Image: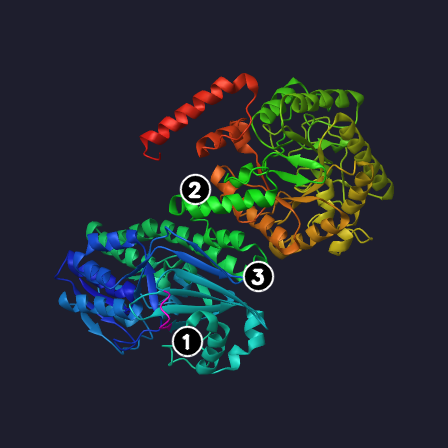
Amino acid sequence: MKVAVLGGGPAGLYFAISMKLRDAAHDITVFERNRPDDTFGWGVVLSDETLDNLAENDPVSAERIREHFAYWDDIAVVHKGVRTLSTGHGFCGIGRMRLLILLQERARELGINLQFETEIDDPRPFMAEHDMVLAADGLNSRTRTTFADVFKPDIDVRKCKFVWLGTHQKFDDAFTFIFEKTEHGWVWAHAYQFDDETATFIVECGPETWEKFGFGEMSQQESIAVCERIFKDHLGGHSLMTNANHIRGSAWINFPRVLCERWSHENIALMGDAAASAHFSIGSGTKLALESAIALAEYLHTEPTLKEAFDKYEDARRLEVLRLQSAARNSLEWFEEVERYLDLDPVQFNYSLLTRSQRISHENLRLRDPEWLADAESWFQQQAGAEDNAARPPMFAPYKLRGLTLKNRVVVSPMAQYKAVDGSPTDWHMVHYCERAKGGAGLVYIEMTCVSPEGRITPGCPGFYKPEHEVAWTRIVDFVHRETDAKICAQIGHSGPKGSTQLGWEEMDAPLKDGNWPVLAASEVSWSEQNQTPKAMDRNDMDMVRDQFVAAAQMAERCGFDMLELHCAHGYLLSSFISPLTNRREDDYGGSLENRMRYPLEIFHAVRAVWPDDKPISVRISANDWVGGEGVTPEEAVEIARMLQEAGVDICDVSAGQTSKRARPVYGRMFQTPFSDRIRNETGMATMAVGNIYEPDHVNSILMAGRADLVCLARPHLADPYWTLHAAASLGDRGVTWPDPYLPGRDQLYRLAERAEQMTGKV
């Protein structure tokens, strides 16, 4: 096979090597625009796993690369003058120039033709003259541009500015992150050793800080001088160096996140940054390139046709690329918004940085550095006011809101049961809620309980508007208080335009087949074409519903509930005022966010006036309508939270979506937690995180990183009412309270857990 490789970086060279190893008869030429010893980066980072893959593919080059690696196990974070060190991370680095030279030498040994200083403006002549062409021509790939209509690249230029420098201050004891507050804002550095004499030193900052420094108008040497001044306390007298003298100006750039819909066309395939890029903060770009080179070379020798080889290459590598890009996106977004975290205590800031990509979890950190994590857990317990500051997972730290103290941070999220009869909870509710209160969670929510018959979502939804409702709810609350140490919260709401619909296991949000009741909303905007058009509320309607909320809150207080929540999310009545998708009013209750929040805040103030001062009130919001700028955005959700905070709301229950049929949510584990994170760390308001949280690791990571104060789990508690007690057993935590009649079951569970640990060698 006659093969052309466009681009002589790690991807192109290693693909050529991998092809020759599989068939020495291949005629392979690598075309590179630069000279052999030109390189414009400094060090690259690889993992032990990647090294093992290289050794299996080509032991010769792998051994040569390994001989030049710098190894380190620690991460150091310098923040607020405190240097925090954690270990067990296992990195290895090599100079990019050294890596290229080693790969060039290996390529020549195998008979690969290397042609340098060759400009490649158009890949089509190479396609005509070769059986197969690999385009590994980098972030600014001309091949990708030439066939943009086929590859359909999505290029997202991120907002932070960075410059890639080097230094003889080796940072040889740890991968080091340094955060410095300057007269123009925060500037930070990513520093790591890659040979005996040199370290990579990437300087990064936000666009506002970059503008204020005037880096864009500086020469490289002027820019470097400023960076040396900023980081003088960390450079040990060493200077910073550039190897990008070919670039005019200061050499600062924005990172472009590249993802192509397709990676191949006719007889050409994309690889490396030409196909997909991963942010430097997770150090996986070279890993992706080398492992993709191995995969494509293998498929070209196992599949019957070029097309089938390309198809298999895309299918096999795309998932891994997307997984790493997801982690890289999380990481780069953390750095883009790092100023929201810089007021955190150094302990929590360090934890937040280490877990930013979501690839490292709480228990994974315990495996890496149990001593550091134990100290961090003790710090968290101390901050929470625990009686004993011994190391315990954050989920078992107490939490206080007004006069309410929760034994831990786990919340049983509100989950509609659709089992009420004429608005009254039944024995089903008695068993359902009391079982979950016995299960170890600190706080148990009841489902949205409606303030009027017309405010119900379905005929099976409960209410707070009849005397028999009060009797039934009091029975449940009394059991929870008498037999458990859990607290119980009443969520009250009005269905608005989503009312008069079928039970959840019938057709969700569809109108009743018969017996529909009229519905209200901010405007005459129906939930869907098949749902009835609601009446736009007039002042009399607003007064009536306000009084219904007040009466419901008073009933909840008489029932003995410990906490109250107003449901202002998910397209229900109060949500219909907040979202511009459903609020089309032209009076004082429509238009601006201030106007759209006016009625929900009226309801809150009226309810707060009758709710006891020592009991907290939360508000659930939809922090993202998932329709772009036409609806509520995460940025606007921050302003909503500020208004709630100023009004006296104690904690924000941060959900998202369900406000429009047009919504296009992006799902994933903990997918709504970033909204809680943003609100908490930009406003200082306490938050609850919700949304596809299902493992103790998720809960502990969210809490320890300061992304929420409480964590709500729904479906896990449907599957296991004793989720919290079982989580404690799995984590080896024996500080939770079990119901006395269940102690023999607890003891057996603990014995089985200890036996499993012994068998797996954990103890």
The amino acid beneath tag 3 is Glu
* Residue 339, disc: 3
Q: Earlier in the sequence, mark 3 or mark 1?
A: 1
Q: In the image, which is nearer the foreground, mark 3 or mark 1? A: 1
Q: In the image, which is nearer the foreground, mark 1 or mark 2? A: 1
* Residue 363, disc: 2
| Quadrant including the N terminus | bottom left
Q: Main secondary structure of the magenta part?
A: loop
Q: Is residue 504 above or below residue 261?
A: above
Tag 3 near tag 1, CB within 8 Å = no
Tag 1 near tag 2, CB within 8 Å = no
Give me the residue at 49% from left, 32% from top: 728
The amino acid beneath tag 1 is Gly
Q: In which quarter of the image is residue 569?
A: top right
Q: Position of residue 669 (x, y in %)?
A: 49, 43
Q: Where is residue 159 in the image (x, y as percent from the top left)?
A: 53, 66
The amino acid beneath tag 2 is Glu
Residue 28 part of the magenta-drawn span: no
| Extent of the magenta region | 167-171
Q: Distance between the residues labelled 3 and 1?
A: 28 Å
Residue bearing the label numbered 1: 237
Q: Is residue 574 above or below residue 630?
A: above
Q: How crowded is mark 2: few (under 14 residues within 10 Å), some or many (20 or more)?
A: some
Q: How far apart are marks 1 and 2 (CA)?
A: 39 Å
Give me the residue at 75% from left, 56% from top: 592
Between 236 and 469, the one lying in front of the other is 236
Give me the residue at 60% from left, 55% from top: 628
